[in-house]
Image (spheres, rainbow, N blue to C red):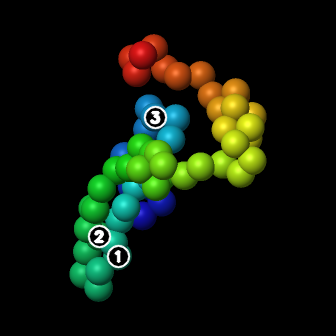
């Protein structure tokens, strides 16, 4: 499952891969680019800039 998740996430800087291990197979759920729908506030609010500073938005997303 880790190998499959890594292949599905290749080429992205962040993505959550939902896979389900059933008794007879692995089932794909979804790819999520933003945890909590991007609606998880930082406390204190200044941490938003601190955590976001190292991230460079890939050109294709601008």
Q: Residue at x 46, y 55 (%)?
A: 36
Q: Secondary structure at mark 3?
A: loop
Numbered tag placed on residue 21 in the rendering: 1
Distance, label 2 to label 1, CA atoms, is: 5 Å
Q: Secondary structure at mark 1?
A: strand
N-term mark: 2 or 1: 1
- 52 up-or-down from 14: above or below: above
The residue singled out by tag 3 in the image is: 12
Q: Is residue 21 left or right of residue 38?
A: left
Q: Residue at x 63, y 28 (%)?
A: 55
Tell me whether the residue at label 2 lies in contact with that at label 1, contact meaning CB atoms closer than 8 angstroms: yes
**What is the tally of numbered marks visible in this picture?**
3
Numbered tag placed on residue 61 in the rendering: none
Q: Secondary structure at mark 2?
A: strand
Distance, label 3 to label 1, CA atoms, is: 23 Å
Residue 29 appears in the figure? yes
N-term mark: 3 or 2: 3
Badge 3 local density, few (<14 within 10 Å), some, or many (20+)? few
N-term mark: 3 or 1: 3
| Camera-nearest label, 3 or 1 | 3
The C terminus, quarter of image: top left
- 15 up-or-down from 29: above or below: above
Distance, label 3 to label 2, CA atoms, is: 22 Å
Q: Position of residue 47 (x, y in %)?
A: 73, 41
Badge 1 local density, few (<14 within 10 Å), some, or many (20+)? few
The residue singled out by tag 2 in the image is: 26
Badge 2 local density, few (<14 within 10 Å), some, or many (20+)? few
């Amino acid at each position: 499952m880790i190998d499959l998740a890594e292949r599905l996430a290749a080429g992205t800087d962040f993505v959550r891969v939902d896979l389900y291990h059933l008794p007879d197979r692995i089932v794909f759920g979804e790819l999520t680019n933003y945890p909590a729908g991007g609606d998880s506030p930082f406390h204190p609010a200044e941490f938003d800039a601190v955590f976001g500073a190292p991230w460079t938005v890939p050109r294709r997303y601008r």
